[in-house]
Amino acid sequence: MEKREADGRHEQRADTAGIRRARDREAREAVLLRSEGRCENPWCLLPELPYRTAAGGSLLEVDHIDDHARGGRDHPSAMIALCPNCHANKTRGAGRAVLRERLRPVARELDAAQDSDAARATGAMPPRSKAVLEQCAALLASLDDADRNRALASLTDRFG
């Protein structure tokens, strides 16, 4: 390894070509809010761990039940917040196909509970826990002034 480093081979770069499907940032944020900082896999061994960065951001990984790159839907009903271990198992684990099928109805049910027809009809916001509000505050605090102003303007437009 030292010889490879000395020869500069560890600095080699590979060009990649291709176009990646754009992902909806609001859908991702909706899933993270819905999760309230907990892994949404009901079979997770440690769902209550504080999946947070040192700055207070989320360490949860938002995953598309069906691969987004292969046409999976970019909607919270088809996405789930997973801890890094559950995400690795769902993406690369030996039982990934089974886990994907087990998580599919979970994501739909979580989305339906979060955004029920009654809440849509009345315009009522679902209750947010203190943890979610703290997560939002930490996220806003981590942004620079321009991004924070854009985020607050977007929230004001959306929720008046």
Image (cartoon, rainbow, N blue to C red):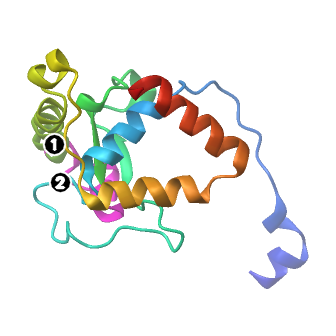
Q: Which mark is residue 103?
A: 1
Q: Is residue 74 magenta?
A: no
> x and y percent of residue 9 in the render?
83, 65
Q: Residue furthest bottom?
A: 2
Which of the image's four quarters has the C terminus?
top left
Q: Which residue is located at x 37 percent, y 26 percent?
A: 74
- Magenta-highlighted residues: 83-98
Residue closer to the observer: 126 or 14? 126
Structural distance between the alpha carbons of marks 2 and 1: 7 Å
Residue type, numbered disc 1: Leu
Q: Residue furthest front?
A: 160
Q: Which residue is located at x 64 percent, y 40 percent?
A: 149
Q: Quadrant of residue 16?
A: top right
Residue closer to the observer: 66 or 115? 115
Q: Which residue is located at x 51 percent, y 74 percent?
A: 54
Q: Is residue 88 magenta?
A: yes
Image check: 43 left or right of 10? left
Q: Which mark is residue 34?
A: none
Residue type, numbered disc 2: Asn
For the residues bearing labels 2 and 1, Cβ distance under 8 angstroms: yes
Near mark 1 (Cα within 10 A), the count class, few <14, some 14-19 or many ≥20, is: many
Image check: 14 left or right of 127? right
Badge 2 is on which residue? Answer: 41
Lower sequence index among marks 2 and 1: 2
Q: Quadrant of residue 67?
A: top left
